[in-house]
Amino acid sequence: MKKLVIGILAHVDAGKTTLSESMLYLSGKIRKLGRVDKKDAYLDTYELEKERGITIFSKQAIFEVEERQITLLDTPGHVDFSAEMERALRVLDYGILVISGADGVQGHTKTLWRLLELYQVPIFLFINKMDQNGIDKDQILKEMRKQLDDRCIEFGQDETAEFYDQLAMCDEKMMEAYLEEENIELSKIKRAIKERVVFPCFFGSALKLEGIEEFMKGIVKYASIPSYPKEFGAKVFKIARDQQGNRLTFMKLTGGSLKVKDVINNGVWQEKVNQIRIYSGEKFEAVNEIKAGSVCAVIGLSKTKPGEGLGIEENIEGAILEPVLSYQIILPPDCAPRMMLPKLREIEEEIPELCIVWDDELQEIKAQFMGEVQIEILQSLIESRYGVKVDLDAARILYKETIGNIVEGVGHFEPLRHYAEVHLLLEPGEVGSGLVFEMECSEDILAKSWQRLVLSHLKEKTHKGVLTGSPITDMKITLVSGRAHNEHTDGGDFREATYRGVRQGLKEAESILLEPYYSFQLELPEKLVGRAMTDIEKMHGTYEITKSNGEMVVLVGKAPVITMRNYQKEVVAYTKGEGRFFCSLKGYEPCHNPEEVIERMGYDSERDIANPTSSVFCQNGTGFTVNWDKVKDYMHIESYLKEIDDSLEEIIQNQIPTTEEKWIDLEEIDRIFDKTFYANKGKKSSWKRNRSASESYYKSEPYIGRPQETKEKYLIVDGYNIIFAWPELKDLADVNMESARMKLLDYLSNYQGIEKCQIIVAFDAYRLQGHLQEEIKYRNIHMVYTKEAQTADQYIERFVHEKQKEYSIVVATSDALQQIIIRGAGCSLLSARELKEEIERVNEIINQSFEKMKGTGGYYLEDTLSSETKQQINDMISTEDD
């Protein structure tokens, strides 16, 4: 049987669910028409949907019309659940866009139209509620052509010369056919609809079953049946769970077939299909095999996620609609966050836009939301599923950042026996374009495999801006140059260099803070329009009057989400219910109060340990950190933009007139600059070079930059790591940990007396409830017990990050991960074995001094030892004599 997958979309209250019920009823799928207000709609299967009268999750129903099997995907209409709707768009053959004849084209209708265009989904339009008094079909059609597309054509009418004339105006091929034959073949009309050249419009009333049958016949007549390849392919668009808790992966097969017990392999994981279900409403049928063109739910897959492509299908990157609000989820006192987090992760699989985040430092769970209604739904879902009642704190707006000029970001990662350098061109993108990544690097400079690795590292991470730490967007990042070493480069080096290159470029660029904006439509009595205008101006919005009939006025415009978020309640109050307010997310635009937001958020890009702006170079066998504003003085590859500078100079020289006066004015120079893409070089860029690229090629002897000033030395010791790494201390710890600690402290105290460095020994106390950080002076060294929820590793990492510019820091640890982090920060390392050798060396010096002092009474170390150390040695001698 021929198969079609059709999604039904609409602004809330346009009658979408009622239209679905009507189509199912007339097809014979259901015997009784359900109603939203009666809580018995066939596709509103969740109790929350029945209670609130809205669609929350996309569901499917299967019915047959004239030898066509149609899978109807009902999607949410409320703007808060628009991300759920967007996920369904990825598997549609056609879309049905429902518009209320009483309300016309709303803000969210335009959002849906834009999404259908971005996903290239062909559209049938159904204008509903035409049975209501005062609705003018011609006026509605005129409005649709103005606000959506002028190729919206009324179908369902007789195929007259006027009808063909309207179609011919939409497409050259149909125009040629009409001029030649005075007719347009059905195949040409079907092609035009499939290619989104024509948008068929049908009118009727879903509640009264008027025009529904003609609409269904129109779909059958004008929709083309897709063809599919023989190779297996599938698009995952939804994750859900049944009443027994089984994880369901909803997918559309786009190639081949799928059987129970088949093994699916996506290159990363491999899992077996245990069951295949065909859902229609609440009920399902278990089948052994399905063919391409079908939508099914699969049990047995635990790692799938929405947007993932299986088989021949590729993954779909990102979503257009994103949450703009962030909240802290507040749990009851008797509910541990660590216990609740896995449960919230399950819900996040079903609603990915929630972005559940555990803040380890603040010990908080955070989530992102599209709006207030989604918050209420999540609270109800958690309570009904897990029996836990959660609250949320005040909303925080999710900001983003972009740049206003072109810069070259350089990242270098070169601790001992590691090497990578990456040059990235950062350019401002179109509004709403997100992040675009490209490669324009010669393989003679950097091998293709390394280039692909850099590209994957660019894509794998949410890169933070430098103003508020918010995600960056609307930028193009291009790999333009890089360098690897034949022996000392591995994949992790390019990850570090790539991340640092992005951050270094952002620090140089002119960063712009963005905030989410609503587009709105406000209909209210004319006498209140002055109040509305004043409100919108106070909210830093803009508006224009689009309609005025003497009684009612319609304002359309935009305003920041943070200022307009609760305005609907105000409209209802001051218009006494006569006003109507519609809004939808427009996208991100420059923030209306950036200074205030930046100060309030208090983000310091140079103290963000997880996102360093600096680079790591090597000198005398030791890595050292170079601040972002000095990286280009040390880099090993000639600047990409420097070459553009040189080309620019050549252009200017070529434009100098061949007369005696060899000069051009500043305006002419500006015009030349405007002709080049390098019109907005980073304002803080410095392209002065100390040496050529060939001179700085990485060899066994690394490049030595500016002389390093002498800094006070610090030795930071991971206490428990060293204790358990030294056999004698470990054996002692098995009997008495305090004795092992004191023994280690004594060793280090003696060591400090000879080496004259500051020593800090860090011990974990993070498991002690309510414990505050405790610092104790033991003889000539410092001992630190960490606070609750902070490990010694975290304390050391923070200390290194904050103090590495001021001091020369050596960290003693044998923790492999910790060593990588410390090395990446540019500090030196001592393993447990190396520290033990150092201690033994110092003890040997002390023992020699004992013998010397006993035999001669001389103090040949007197000139090098501090008075405190001398006293310690005397105390040891006295103890030994006793």
Image (cartoon, helix red, strand yellow):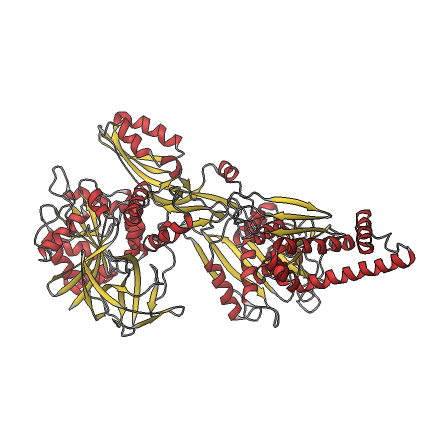
| Residue 701 drawn at (x, y percent) | 71, 67
Extreme-right residue of the structure? 856
Q: Is 644 on the left-hand or right-hand side of 294?
A: right
Residue sitting at 70 percent across and 62 percent down?
836
Q: Is residue 638 visible?
A: no
Residue 707: quarter of image? bottom right
Extreme-bottom residue of the structure? 230
- Quadrant holding the N terminus: bottom left
| Residue 675 drawn at (x, y percent) | 52, 53
Q: Is 397 on the left-hand or right-hand side of 636?
A: left
Residue 488: quarter of image? bottom right
| Residue 856 drawn at (x, y percent) | 92, 57
- Quadrant holding the C terminus: bottom right
| Residue 260 drawn at (x, y percent) | 25, 71
Relative to 586, residue 421 above or below: below
Looking at the image, which is closer to me, 664 or 843? 843
